[in-house]
Image: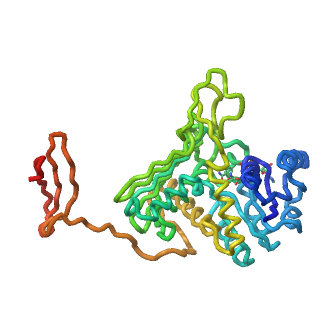
């Protein structure tokens, strides 16, 4: 059982507390920190939390707690992590780890120097669907992964600080690209080195300094591509979709708008529909169990089980640092309009090129490029001569002759 200090009483502080206190959990948020006493008291009363404070250091150093959860705006993550490491406590930090790789690296070094447990709270790799999909990919169901596309778009975030580049570190890329990048890394393989990024970013709609839309390609040492698509301009709710393609298969995941629960109501559902839902009438996509569907429940399960077992969780600060390094390269690319190398001063995965695709032999003389059954019953084979390299086609009749 763990007693937890919760830093932040906003959207994520609430979902984290719901997940931690859900399903008769033995783990308990013991202390909550908020800027104002009123907000802290309301949050504590809503979620049955014994202690409140408006002093962040006091919340972290409270002698009753052994785990600190950071659910504060991005510019406060480093300070919170530094204080938690100094206090010798396990620290779990929300995404993005830092506003940039420099901050993330200092946070990684602080927890490793202090020898404290650290977890990166990237919930979207912990959705039940994603956990199963990643396991299938590791079992070889898709063959070699070639392309992992992840999309996160909605009409824009819910608090002022997200829209302030100095506090947040950027726009949709740092806010949501961090999810997409880590989802792709999980499918492509975290041991595979990300090499370079090509990114388009623009401020299409909002009067802000940062980008409100971006598309990026991350090239990995295996030849795989991770594609992220992010926007704060999308209308119609929150679109969270992933697609993974490999030499032997494909996975499509939809986490929010087409989950199998669709409702039409002319009069309204009578309550909260789902995060970032734009309306309460017409066609709706309610979500049965938001903390579970977004991965928070399985994420805290893994984090606290790992802490108990003395092992690393599936996502730790090193992952957060790699994600921030990829994001930094994306911002450089959006400026230069060229492929930009990813600067990873600390790399703990495999070196060199990995996972070449093996050519499929058709017979002694040919490689098989493609086989397709046509509507008239014939089968077309596209072959390449092993000796000369010429591409030819061979047609078999419906009897295979
Ligand atoms: N799926 C996810 O993992 C997910 C979702 C949303 C937010 N987040 C992350 O969680 C963090 C917080 O986001 P949120 O959505 O909860 O934001 P929010 O604005 O809803 O809440 C932020 C909290 O921090 C407090 N706060 C704001 N400015 C402060 C300051 N200067 N000093 C002290 N406290 C301050 C606010 O009062 C509030 O309690 C961000 O890093 C964000 O990226 C993660």
Which image quadrant is residue 374 in?
Answer: top left
Q: Nearer the viewer, residue 155 or 169?
A: 155
Estimate the x, y position of residue 384 in percent, counting from the top left. Answer: 16, 62
Estimate the x, y position of residue 107 in percent, counting from the top left. Answer: 70, 69
Which image quadrant is residue 153 in?
Answer: top right
Q: Nearer the viewer, residue 16 or 2?
A: 2
Q: Is residue 283 visible?
A: yes
Tell me the quarter of the image containing the N terminus. bottom right
- Say above or below: 312 vs 56: below
Q: What residue sits 72% from the left and 71% below the top?
A: 308
Tell whether 3 sits left or right of 249. right
Tell whether 236 sits left or right of 340. right
Color scheme of the displayed model: rainbow
Q: What residue sits 84% from the left and 47% below the top?
A: 43
Q: What residue sits 73% from the left and 46% below the top?
A: 11
Q: Is residue 235 visible?
A: no
Estimate the x, y position of residue 64 in percent, counting from the top left. Answer: 88, 66
């Amino acid at each position: 059982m763990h007693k937890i200090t919760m830093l932040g009483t906003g959207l994520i502080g609430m979902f984290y507390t719901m997940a931690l206190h859900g399903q008769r959990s033995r783990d308990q948020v013991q202390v909550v920190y908020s800027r104002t006493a009123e907000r802290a008291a309301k949050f504590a009363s809503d979620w049955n939390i014994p202690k409140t404070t408006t002093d962040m250091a006091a919340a972290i150093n409270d002698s009753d707690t052994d785990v600190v959860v950071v659910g504060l705006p991005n510019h406060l993550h480093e300070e919170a992590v530094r204080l938690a490491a100094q206090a010798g406590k396990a620290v779990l930090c929300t995404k993005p780890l830092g506003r940039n790789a420099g901050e993330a690296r200092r946070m990684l070094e602080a927890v490793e120097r202090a020898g404290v447990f650290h977890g990166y709270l990237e919930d979207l790799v912990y959705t039940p669907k994603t956990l199963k999909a990643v396991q299938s990919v590791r079992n070889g169901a898709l063959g070699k992964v070639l392309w992992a596309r992840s999309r996160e778009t909605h009409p824009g975030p819910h608090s002022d600080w997200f829209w302030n580049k100095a506090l947040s570190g950027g726009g949709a890329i740092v806010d949501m690209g961090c999810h997409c990048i880590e989802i792709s890394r999980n499918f492509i393989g975290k041991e595979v080195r990300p090499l370079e990024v090509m990114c388009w970013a623009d401020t299409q709609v909002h009067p802000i300094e940062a980008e409100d839309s971006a598309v990026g390609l991350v090239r990995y040492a295996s030849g795989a591509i991770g594609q992220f698509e992010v926007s704060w301009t999308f209308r119609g709710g929150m679109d969270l979709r992933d697609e993974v393609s490999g030499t032997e298969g494909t996975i499509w995941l939809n986490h929010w708008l087409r989950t199998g629960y669709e409702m039409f109501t002319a009069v309204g559902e009578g309550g909260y529909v789902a995060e970032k839902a734009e309306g309460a009438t017409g066609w709706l996509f309610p979500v049965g169990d938001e903390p579970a569907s977004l991965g928070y429940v399985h994420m805290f399960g893994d984090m606290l089980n790992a802490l108990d077992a003395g092992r690393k969780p599936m996502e730790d600060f090193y992952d957060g640092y790699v994600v921030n390094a990829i994001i930094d390269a994306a911002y450089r690319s959006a400026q230069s309009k060229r492929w930009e190398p990813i600067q990873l001063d600390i790399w703990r995965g495999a070196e060199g090129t990995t996972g070449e695709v093996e050519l499929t032999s058709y017979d002694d003389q040919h490689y098989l490029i493609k086989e397709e059954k046509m509507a008239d019953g014939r089968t077309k084979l596209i072959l390449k001569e092993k000796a000369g390299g010429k591409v030819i086609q061979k047609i078999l009749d419906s009897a295979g002759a």
